[in-house]
Image: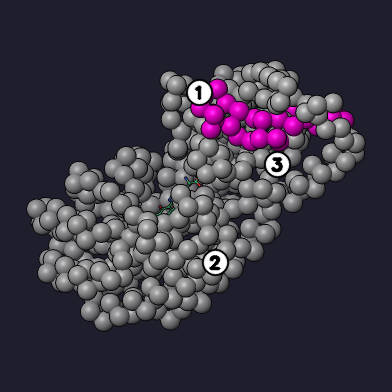
Amino acid sequence: MKNREQVLFSAYIKDFLLANSSRNLFEYVDGYFNFASKKCNFNEIIKKYNKPTYIYDLSFVASRVGLMKKALGNAKIFYAMKANSNRQVLETILNCGCGVDVVSDGEIHRALEVGFTAKQIVFSGVGKTKREIEFAIRAGIYQINVESLPELLRISSIANSLGVKVDVALRLNPNIDIKTHPYIATGLHENKFGMEMSQLRDIRSILISNSQNVNLVGLSLHLGSQMLEFSGFRDALKILKNIFIELRAEFPGLERFDIGGGLGIIYDKANLEIESEMLNEYSKIVMQELQGLEIEIQTEPGRWLVAHAGVLLSQVQYVKKTRYKTFLVLDTGMNHLIRPALYQAFHEIIPVLEKPTEVRVKYDIVGPICESADFFAKDRLLPEMFQDDFVVILDAGAYGFSMANSYNLQDMADEICI
Ligand code: LLP
C-alpha cells in the first residue's frame, strides 16, 4: 500500500515503549496522553478544546530548577525568560528562589509584575534602547550585561543624567564554536553578540573615565543555545578566567562571573538520565575552571528548565492524500511553534488518544500557514490518524509560545498550566 508501512502491532508498541520509557516524561493513562506527573487530564482538556493550546507542567519546571540548583551549588540562577514568559511559569521559577535574565523593557515589566524584585533581574541583549536602559536603571535592576562600547557609553551617559552609578558586566565574545545550529550560535566573531577581546584596552579606559557612573562588577559570556558538548565552553571559561584575574587587579568591584545559558536538551529520543549526566558534566567544568576565584557565579538557563515541561495540543483538520504524500493538516503551524521552520528542529509528535494499531502511516505533518516551510515533520511514522483526532507536539515549553506570532492573522494559542 502506498504511503503506508505495515508493521506488527507488537513491534510498534515495543518501539514506542522503548523510546518513551527512557524519557520518563509522559505516559498514557486510561488511554489518554499524560505528563509523567499524571497531573493533567487530557480527556477533559480535549472536551473543552477551542484552539491550539500550550500546556505546561509546573511541577516539572520546579523539579528541573531543583536539579540545576543541586548541580551548580552556589551559583545564582537567572532564568532566561525569553524561553517562556508565561506568568505562572515565571511564578514557579520565582518561588524556587531564582532571578531572571531579561532582554527588553517588556520582559522587565513582566518580571516585576510577577513579583521578581529589581535586584533579581539581570538585563542582557544586544540592542538596548535609551528608553529601556533608563527604565532599567530607574527600576534599580541588579546588573546590566553590556554588549558593545557604544552601549557602555550610553549607559554611562544615562546614569550620569540620573545621578547614579550602575553595576555593569561585560559580555565578551571569545570566538568559540559550540557546534550548534548557526542561527543560535552567539560566541563567534561573525556573531553580533559580546565584545571582542581586542577591545579590552578601550573598554578599560572607558570604564576608568566613566567610573562616576559605571561600576564593573562582572564578566559574562553566552556562547549560544542547545549546547550538547562542552569542550568549547571549557575553553571559553579558561579564557575569561584569565581576563577576570587581570581586570580584578584594576577593578576591585569585579566579583561576578556570568556563565550564560545554553545547556541543551535531547529532543529526539529524550532521555532524562543522559540529560542529568550532561548537567553534571557541565557543572563539573564550571566548578573546575572557576575554582579559587571567590566570586558569585551566575547562570542564565532557559531551555533546560522549561522545554520538556510543555506540549502543544492541536487537532487534525484534514488527512489529505495525494499520489505522493499523505499530509496531516493541523490547526497549528509555524505561527505557534516556529522552531521546525526556523532551525529544522525535531519535535516528537504523538496522538493524544492511545492508538493500538497494526498500522503505521508516513505523514507530512503540516500547519495551515501559507508557506511551504510550515511543517513540523516530513515522512513521520504515526499510527493511522483521522480528522478531528488530537496530537501533542512534545518539548514545546521553550521558545514555543514566546516566539509565536499572528501571521495570516491566526489567533495566538491558548496556554494552560497544571
Ligand atoms: N542568556 C542569553 C544572553 C541568551 O541570549 C540566551 C538565549 C540564554 C541566556 C538562554 O539560552 P538557553 O539556556 O535557553 O539555551 N529560539 C532558539 C533559542 C534562542 C536562544 C536565544 N538566547 C530555539 O528555539 O532553539
Please name whichever residue, 192 or 20, is drawn nearer the observer in this view of the structure. Answer: 192
Specify the segment rendered in magenta.
353-380
| Quarter of the figure with the C terminus | top right
Label 3: few (<14), some or many (≥20) within 10 Å? some
Is 368 contained in the magenta span? yes
Residue 272 figure quarter: bottom right
Residue 250 picture location, percent across and down? 23, 79
**Residue 249: x percent and y percent?**
26, 82
Q: Which residue is mark 2?
A: 230
Question: Label 1 is placed on what type of residue?
Answer: Cys
User: Considering only order in the chain, which callout, 2 or 3, is on the residue closer to the N terminus?
Assistant: 3
Work out how far the residue at label 2 is from the one at label 1, CA to CA, in angstroms.
39 Å
Q: Is residue 241 magenta?
A: no
Mark 2, residues whose alpha carbon is within 10 Å: few (<14), some, or many (≥20)? some
| Mark toward the viewer: 3 or 2 | 2
Answer whether residue 125 is visible to the viewer in this image: yes
Residue 285 position (above or below residue 363): below
Q: Nearer the viewer, mark 2 or mark 1?
A: 1
Residue 77 visible in the shown view: no
Q: Residue at x 55, y 72 (%)?
A: 284
x then y, percent, for residue 34: 70, 36
